[in-house]
C-alpha cells in the first residue's frame, strides 16, 4: 500500500526482515480474529476502498469534524502530522477483538517461542525494562512476550523499518540506536526525495513504535527509518501484540485520553504525545488531609490532579500558597531544578492523582518545560529567571 511508483529497497509493501514478516499460522489466526472487528483490517483486500475507506475520516483529518462513519475517501493527516485514522479508530470498538474472548481460536492460541541466548535475554530485558507498555504484564504474560520477541539487527542508516500506508505486521522495541519518524500528509509514502514527508520525531533506545496500526487496525501512520548504523530492534508479531499487550495499552490510553485533553498544560502537545504520556501515568487515590508531597523531600514524581482539590503550603506559613483543582499540575519544580521539594502538597478532599515518574517526565514533557517554568510561585525561583531576563523583577 505504499505509494505506487515508489521503489522500496525491500520491494513493494515489504519490510527489511524478509521471510519473518508474518508466519502463515499467524495470518490465518489474524483473519479469524478480525471477523469480530468493526474496523476493516489493513490485511483485507477492501482496505482503503469501499467500506474500509470511510474509516479514515476523523477530526484530525483537517476538514472532517466528527466521528461519523459516513463519508468519502480517506482523510489526510492533520497539520500536526497525526494520522486521521487514529482518532477515528480509537473511538470505535476495534478493541473488541482483544477485550473479549473470541472463542476457540482464542483458546487454542499459543504465542510463538523464539529461543534466545542468555546474553540476548539480558539485553532484551534491559531494552523493555523502561518501556511502560510492558510494565503492567503479569509473570506469565511477560514470559510469553519475551519468548515471542525476535531480534532484528538494522545494520545501516536509512533503512525503512515501517512504511507509512502499509499494513501493520510487527510492533518494535528499540534496544540500540535511533529512528526518525516521518509523516506524509497524503497518508502514505510518496515517490521522490520528499516522499517521506515531515520529520515529526525521533525514537531512541528504550522507546518503541509500530503500535498504532496493530491497535487500531489502521495503515501505518508514519514512516520509521533508521537514523544511524548498527541499530538493534526487537519485533513482536501482530497477534501476540494484540493478544497480550494491547489490552492494557489500549485500556490505559482510553482511560487517560479524555482527561489529558482537558489538562491546560498539555494542550499544545499532539494527540500522539499525549498518548505516550497516558502510557506512563499511574493513578493514585488519597483521602482528604494526606500529604502527597512533603517540603524538603527529594522529588521523584510529577502529578496531575485527576479529581478533587489540594493545596500547597510552605513552612512557616499557615495559609496555603496555592490551590489545585482538576487538571492542575504540581511537583514539577524539584524535577526541573533538581532541588528538594519547595512546598508540601496536601489533599483538601479525597483526590485522585495521575503520577509520572522522573525519567518519563523528563522524556515526555520537554515540549512544555517553558510553560511549567513560567508558573509563578511566591518566594520560589522557577528557573525562568535564567531563561528569560524580562521575567526578572
Ligand atoms: N507523530 C506520530 N504520528 C504517528 N505515528 C507516530 C508518530 N510518532 C511516532 N509514531 C510511531 O510511528 C509508527 C508508524 O507505524 P504505526 O502507525 O503502526 O505506529 C506509529 C507510531 O508507533
Image (cartoon, rainbow, N blue to C red):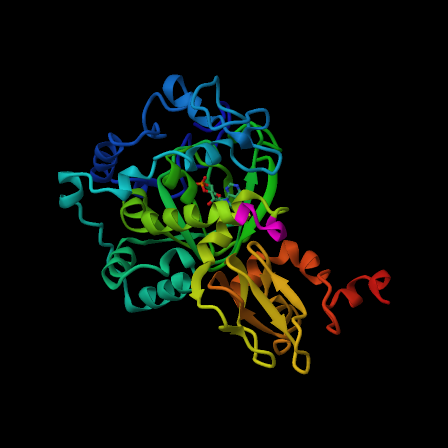
Q: Position of residue 82 (x, y in %)?
A: 55, 37
Q: Is residue 334 above or below residue 21?
A: below
Which quarter of the picture shows residue 147? Answer: bottom left
Q: Which residues are magenta?
A: 260-266
Q: Position of residue 8 (x, y in %)?
A: 47, 33
Residue name at image x 70 percent, y 58 percent: 370
Residue name at image x 58 percent, y 33 percent: 78
Relative to residue 55, is residue 199 drawn left or right?
Answer: right
Task: State the residue in front, 240 or 151.
Answer: 240
Q: Is residue 68 above or below residue 246?
A: above
Q: Is residue 206 above or below residue 333?
A: above
Residue name at image x 29 percent, y 59 percent: 146
Query: Is residue 261 one of those drawn in magenta?
Result: yes
Residue name at image x 62 percent, y 53 percent: 265
What main secondary structure does the magenta stretch of the protein show? helix
Task: State the residue in front, 61 or 328.
Answer: 328
| Quadrant showing the C terminus | bottom right
Task: State the residue in front, 47 or 377.
Answer: 377
Amino acid at each position: 500500500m505504499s505509494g505506487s511508483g515508489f521503489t522500496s529497497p525491500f520491494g513493494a509493501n515489504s519490510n527489511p526482515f524478509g521471510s519473518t514478516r508474518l508466519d502463515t499460522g499467524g495470518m490465518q489466526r489474524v483473519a479469524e480474529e478480525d471477523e469480530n472487528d468493526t474496523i476493516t483490517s489493513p490485511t483485507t483486500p477492501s482496505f482503503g476502498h469501499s467500506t474500509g475507506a470511510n474509516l479514515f475520516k476523523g477530526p484530525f483529518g483537517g476538514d472532517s469534524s466528527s466521528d461519523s462513519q459516513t463519508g468519502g475517501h480517506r482523510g489526510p493527516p492533520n497539520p500536526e502530522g497525526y494520522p486521521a485514522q487514529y482518532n477515528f479508530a480509537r473511538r470505535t470498538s476495534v478493541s473488541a477483538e482483544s477485550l473479549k474472548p473470541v472463542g476457540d481460536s482464542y483458546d487454542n492460541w499459543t504465542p510463538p517461542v523464539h529461543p534466545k541466548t542468555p546474553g540476548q535475554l539480558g539485553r532484551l530485558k534491559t531494552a523493555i525494562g523502561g518501556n511502560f507498555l510492558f510494565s503492567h504484564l503479569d509473570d506469565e504474560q511477560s514470559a510469553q512476550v519475551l519468548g515471542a520477541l525476535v531480534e532484528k539487527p538494522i545494520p545501516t542508516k536509512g533503512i525503512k523499518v515501517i512504511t507509512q500506508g502499509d499494513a501493520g505486521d510487527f510492533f518494535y522495541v528499540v534496544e540500540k540506536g535511533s529512528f526518525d519518524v516521518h509523516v506524509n500528509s497524503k497518508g502514505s509514502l510518496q515517490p521522490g526525495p520528499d516522499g517521506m514527508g515531515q520529520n515529526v520525531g525521533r525514537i531512541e533506545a528504550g522507546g518503541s513504535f509500530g503500535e498504532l496500526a496493530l491497535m487500531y487496525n489502521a495503515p501505518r501512520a508514519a514512516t520509521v527509518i533508521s537514523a544511524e548504523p548498527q541499530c538493534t530492534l526487537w519485533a513482536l508479531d501482530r497477534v501476540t501484540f494484540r493478544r497480550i499487550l494491547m489490552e492494557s495499552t489500549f485500556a490505559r490510553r482510553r482511560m487517560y485520553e479524555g482527561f489529558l485533553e482537558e489538562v491546560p498544560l498539555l494542550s499544545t502537545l499532539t494527540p500522539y504525545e499525549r498518548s505516550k504520556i497516558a502510557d506512563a501515568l499511574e493513578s493514585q487515590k488519597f483521602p482528604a488531609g494526606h500529604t502527597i508531597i512533603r517540603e524538603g523531600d527529594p522529588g521523584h514524581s510529577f502529578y496531575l490532579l485527576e479529581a478533587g482539590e489540594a493545596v500547597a503550603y510552605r513552612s512557616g506559613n499557615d495559609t496555603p500558597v496555592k490551590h489545585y483543582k482538576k487538571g492542575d499540575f504540581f511537583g514539577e519544580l524539584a524535577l526541573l531544578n533538581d532541588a528538594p521539594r519547595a512546598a508540601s502538597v496536601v489533599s483538601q478532599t479525597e483526590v485522585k492523582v495521575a503520577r509520572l515518574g522522573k525519567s518519563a517526565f523528563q522524556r515526555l514533557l520537554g515540549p512544555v518545560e517553558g510553560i511549567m517554568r513560567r508558573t509563578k510561585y511566591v518566594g520560589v525561583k522557577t528557573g525562568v529567571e535564567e531563561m528569560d531576563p524580562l521575567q526578572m523583577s
